[in-house]
Image (spheres, rainbow, N blue to C red):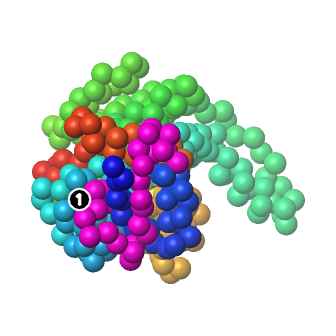
Amino acid sequence: MKLKIALTCPDADAAKPWRNALTTQLLALGADAEIALWPERFADPDYALVWGAGQGFLDAHRGVKALFTLGAGVDGLLKLDVPAAMPIIRIEDGGMAAQMAEYVCHAALRHVRQFDVYESAMRTSAAGGGAWQPLEPRRPAQFPVGIMGMGALGSRVAQALQAFGFPVNGWSRSAKEIPGVASFGGEASLDRFLQASRILVCMLPLTPDTRDLINRARLQQLQSPGYFINVARGAHVVEADLLALIDSGHLAGAALDVFREEPLPASHPFRAHPRIALTPHTAAQTLIDESAQQIAHKIVALERGESVGGLVDRSRAY
Ligand SMILES: NC(=O)c1ccc[n+]([C@@H]2O[C@H](COP(=O)([O-])OP(=O)(O)OC[C@H]3O[C@@H](n4cnc5c(N)ncnc54)[C@H](OP(=O)(O)O)[C@@H]3O)[C@@H](O)[C@H]2O)c1
């Protein structure tokens, strides 16, 4: 039997590689599939794949067996009206965990080794002729890192940081047992987790419980001068509180990949801030081949009546 799969992407150029990769991966597993690129559509599709779905696409595919998102986060999708009974399945890692590890280790090491300070000193000294000045050495061991969110991505980042000698604390809803990581579970342990950390990394999903979680009261508990890295979602953070704490010196700076408004407006105070490093929501991008392979395996498993990972729990919103 030929599976009918509906796919929507922000533009046709992005959709075609997904269609090719998924067709190849399904064929490799012995499954024959026809994939329609929205607004092409089937009357009775089996599965739908969404990247930046609109309500029109969801309304046209209310009967599918499962809805696959082509990313790790589902906060955008859950703002839409998705039928309560429709299983939503997200990408688990799909090549993103290694990219997150690279991003967070780079940001943490850049801060600890003060490469940002050297870069700026070398630039300003080009005119003035000075500032060829090695600073006192600092070691990762002096900078305990607190990772908020120890899921598919956070747990991989923890491993990578440990390899550089960072002490690692992990905070999640349920406490974890990860070798070498001090684990904190649930809201009751949040203050202790923050007080034990100097660099804070946000890797949480955006849910009603985590929106605005990172505010002045929470950031103030970090060991000072602390540092903040956000690779999750902008709405986790009260941006004015973060700025105030950097300007007061309680935080030495921040590396931010995500923002409350994206693209980050040209006039936003983060743009020109000397102690904030910015990237355009690119810390970890979905890799098509890895992700298509994962989705193909899950479709085949679902067709066999088996359960699959990455099923979104609608009551938790992640
Ligand atoms: N910037 C980028 O380029 C980019 C790329 C990909 C993903 N992301 C973001 O990264 C997020 C994390 O992805 P993931 O795949 O690692 O997600 P995941 O596997 O679902 O892990 C989420 C983690 O957060 C914890 N958590 C959720 N709600 C919590 C709460 N209220 N209090 C404490 N801990 C809580 C979970 O705890 P339990 O383990 O106890 O359930 C889990 O450890 C995504 O949702 C997405 O927003 C960003």
Along the line of sight, the residue nearer the viewer: 101 or 42: 42
Q: Write the residue at 71% across / 50% down.
A: 118
Q: Is mark 1 within 8 Å of ligand 1?
A: no
Relative side of 275 to 205, left or right? right
Q: Position of residue 153 (x, y in %)?
A: 41, 40
Res 208 quadrant in image: bottom left
Left or right, 305 with respect to 203, comes to left
Q: Is residue 21 visible to us here?
A: yes
The image quarter in which residue 296 lies = top left
Q: Nearer the viewer, residue 182 or 243?
A: 182
Whether residue 242 is visible, yes or no, is no
* Looking at the image, residue 173 lies above or below residue 6: above
Crowding at dot 1, Cα within 10 Å, few <14 / some 14-19 / many 20+, comes out as: some
Residue drawn at x 34%, y 58% as measured from the top left: 4
**Residue 13, how many percent across, how many down?**
56, 70
Foreground residue among 233 and 61? 61
User: Does the stretch in magenta take in 226?
Assistant: no
Q: Which residues are magenta?
A: 24-52
The image quadrant that residue 259 belongs to is bottom left
Residue 45 magenta:
yes
SS at badge 1: loop
Amino acid at dot 1: Val
Image coordinates for residue 258, horizontal then vertical, percent:
44, 61
Q: Camera-side residue: 269 or 30?
A: 30
Q: Is residue 38 above or below residue 109?
A: below
In the depicted structure, whether residue 150 falls above or below residue 79: above
Residue at 15% across, 37% down: 188
According to the picture, the residue beneath numbered tag 1 turns out to be 64
Q: Which x, y percent locates residue 245?
A: 40, 58
Q: As drawn, which residue projects farthest toward the front?
A: 1
